[in-house]
Image (tube, helix red, strand yellow):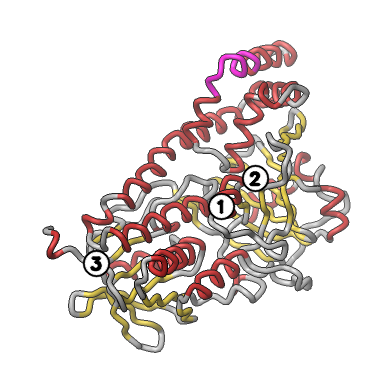
C-alpha cells in the first residue's frame, strides 16, 4: 500500500472499542493520551454491556484477579497507581502445597507488590462497600481521558461505506475509522467477527473454574494470610488449583480439562486443601462461580485494515498475567494507530512485533507447565521440589534458584523465557535432582 493511500487517524477521527476490560480500557486511555499530546482530537466510543459497580456475574469479567508485581511497577511508571480501594490484599508470598508437604515461597525482594483484586465490585452476596472494581477503575481512567462509555450490547459487526460498523441491541448502526475488538473468547466472538469477514479465527481455549468462597475476614487472615495458596495435586484432569485471599472472601481457581462440579468438590475435599480451610467449613449450596475459557494458542488474522483485536480474543499470555499482556498489546496498538496508521500493513509493524514477542514467550511457558505437569504426577518429584524449596528459603535471595522459578511462574512477574533459563541453573538443578533421588530411596521405590 502506498504512502498516499495509507489509512490514518486525523482530527475528529472516530474509534469504536468493544469491551471495557483491561485491553479495551488501556487502549482507549493510551490512544486519547497520545492524541492529546500531539494536539489531535480523536473521538472514542467504548462499548461495555456490564456494569462493574454491580456485585456478582452482572459486573464481573470472570478472572482470578492477580496483578503481577511487574505490571504494578509498570503502571506506576505511567502515573497509574492502584488505589487502596481497588487492592483487596497485598500478596507477599505463595504457599506451595503437595501431598509431600507445604512450603512458603517469599517474594524475592520482600515487598508486597502483587495485588489481589476483584474484576467486578465483588462476588454475589458481598456487603462491604469499601472496595472498587479493578475493571471499573480502568474504565474510569479511559472515561476521564475523554472516552464516551456506551453501556450497550453489540449484536452485530459489519461494513458501511468501507468503514467497520457496529450495530447495538437497539438497532443503531455506527461506523468508525478504526474498530478495536477487545472481548473474551466465547461463543459470541466467532459470530460477531463473521460480519467483518477478513479471515479472523479465535484462539484455542481450555476450560477453567473460578468460585468465590465466603469465609469471613478473621478466618481469611488466620488461615490464608497475605499468601496465595497453590496446590499441585495428583488428580486426573487438574493441572493446578489456587486459593487467593480477598478480605472476607477466598477466590478458588482451577485449571484443567473438562472441569465439572464433581471434580471441583473432589479437589476442595483433598487433605491439602482442607488443611487450609476452616475445619468445620462446608461447600455452600449457593455461591458465586463461573467457568471462563483461557486461551492456549494464538488467533488467526487478528487484524486487518481498520480492525484490530486485543485481550483474550487477540494474542495474550499463557495462563498468567493476561492483564499485563493486555497492557502491552493495547499500548502498542494505540501507538501504531496514532503514529503509523490503521491499515493492515501498519498493524503488521510495531503492534504485531509486540504480539509476536508475547507469542514466542508462550512457547517457553508451555514447556514450563508441561514439566510442572510431570512433577505433579510423580510423588518423588513433588517431594523433591518441596525439600529443595524449603532448603532454599533458608538461603540468601540470590541462591533461591528454584524458589524464584516457582514465584515468577505462578505470579507472571517475569517472561517465561527468563524463567525457563533459570531452571537450567546448574546449582538449582543439582539440588533438585539430588533431592528427588533421595526421595526415591526414602520411599523405597
State the residue in front, 228 or 252: 228
Q: Which mark is residue 77?
A: 1
* Residue behind mark 2: 241
Image coords of residue 241 (percent x, y): 65, 45
* Magenta stretch, residue numbers: 423-431
Question: How far across and how far down the image is residue 120, in percent?
Answer: 62, 68
Residue 114 placement (x, y as % from top left): 66, 48
Residue that badge 3 annotates: 8
Residue 428 falls within the magenta-colored stretch: yes
- Overall secondary structure of the magenta section: helix
The span from disc 1 to disc 3 (Cα, nearest Å) is 29 Å
**122 horizontally vs 236: left or right:** right
* Residue 311, image x, y percentages: 44, 58
Q: Is residue 232 visible?
A: yes
Please name whichever residue, 130 or 362, is drawn nearer the observer in this view of the structure: 130
User: In which image quadrant can residue 141 be found?
Assistant: bottom right
At 48% from the left edge and 62% from the top edge, which residue is drawn?
Answer: 26
Q: CA distance from mark 2 to mark 1?
A: 32 Å
Q: Nearer the viewer, mark 2 or mark 1?
A: 1
Numbered disc total: 3
Is 7 a magenta residue?
no
Viewer-nearest of labels 2 and 3? 3
Q: Earlier in the sequence, mark 2 or mark 3?
A: 3
Amino acid at each position: 500500500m502506498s504512502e498516499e493511500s495509507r489509512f490514518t487517524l486525523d482530527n475528529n477521527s472516530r474509534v469504536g472499542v468493544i469491551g471495557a476490560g483491561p485491553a479495551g480500557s488501556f487502549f482507549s486511555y493510551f490512544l486519547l493520551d497520545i492524541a492529546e499530546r500531539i494536539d489531535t482530537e480523536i473521538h472514542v466510543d467504548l462499548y461495555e454491556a456490564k456494569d462493574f459497580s454491580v456485585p456478582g456475574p452482572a459486573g464481573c469479567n470472570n478472572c482470578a484477579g492477580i496483578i503481577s508485581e511487574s505490571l504494578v511497577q509498570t503502571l506506576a511508571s505511567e502515573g497509574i497507581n492502584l488505589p487502596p480501594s481497588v487492592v483487596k490484599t497485598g500478596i507477599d508470598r505463595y504457599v506451595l502445597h503437595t501431598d509431600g508437604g507445604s512450603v512458603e515461597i517469599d517474594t524475592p525482594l520482600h515487598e508486597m507488590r502483587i495485588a489481589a483484586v476483584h474484576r467486578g465490585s465483588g462476588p454475589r452476596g458481598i456487603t462491604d462497600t469499601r472496595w472498587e472494581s479493578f475493571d471499573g477503575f480502568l474504565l474510569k481512567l479511559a472515561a476521564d481521558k475523554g472516552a464516551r462509555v456506551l453501556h450497550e450490547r453489540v449484536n452485530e459487526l459489519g461494513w458501511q461505506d468501507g468503514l467497520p460498523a457496529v450495530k447495538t441491541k437497539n438497532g443503531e448502526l455506527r461506523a468508525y475509522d478504526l474498530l478495536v475488538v477487545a472481548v473474551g473468547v466465547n461463543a459470541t466472538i466467532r459470530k460477531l467477527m463473521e460480519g467483518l469477514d477478513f479471515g479472523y479465527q479465535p484462539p484455542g481455549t481450555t476450560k477453567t473454574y473460578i468460585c468465590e468462597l465466603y469465609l469471613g475476614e478473621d478466618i481469611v487472615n488466620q488461615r490464608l494470610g497475605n499468601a496465595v495458596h497453590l496446590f499441585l495435586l495428583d488428580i486426573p484432569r487438574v493441572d493446578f488449583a489456587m486459593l487467593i485471599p480477598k478480605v472476607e472472601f477466598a477466590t478458588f481457581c482451577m485449571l484443567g480439562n473438562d472441569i465439572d462440579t464433581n471434580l471441583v468438590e473432589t479437589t476442595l475435599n483433598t487433605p491439602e486443601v482442607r488443611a487450609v480451610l476452616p475445619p468445620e467449613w462446608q461447600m455452600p449450596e449457593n455461591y458465586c462461580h463461573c467457568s471462563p475459557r483461557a486461551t492456549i494458542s494464538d488467533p488467526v488474522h487478528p487484524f486487518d485494515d481498520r480492525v484490530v483485536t486485543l485481550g483474550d480474543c487477540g494474542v495474550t499470555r499463557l495462563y498468567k498475567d493476561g492483564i499485563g499482556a493486555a497492557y502491552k498489546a493495547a499500548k502498542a496498538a494505540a501507538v501504531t494507530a496514532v503514529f503509523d496508521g490503521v491499515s493492515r500493513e501498519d498493524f503488521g509493524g510495531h503492534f504485531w512485533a509486540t504480539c509476536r514477542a508475547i507469542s514466542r514467550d508462550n512457547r517457553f511457558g508451555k514447556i514450563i507447565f508441561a514439566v510442572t505437569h510431570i512433577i505433579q504426577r510423580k510423588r518423588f518429584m513433588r517431594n523433591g521440589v518441596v525439600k529443595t524449596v524449603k532448603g532454599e528459603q533458608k538461603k540468601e535471595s540470590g541462591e533461591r534458584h528454584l524458589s524464584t522459578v516457582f514465584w515468577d511462574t505462578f505470579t507472571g512477574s517475569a517472561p517465561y523465557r527468563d524463567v525457563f533459563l533459570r531452571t537450567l541453573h546448574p546449582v538449582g538443578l543439582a539440588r533438585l535432582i539430588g533431592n528427588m533421588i533421595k526421595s526415591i530411596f526414602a520411599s523405597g521405590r
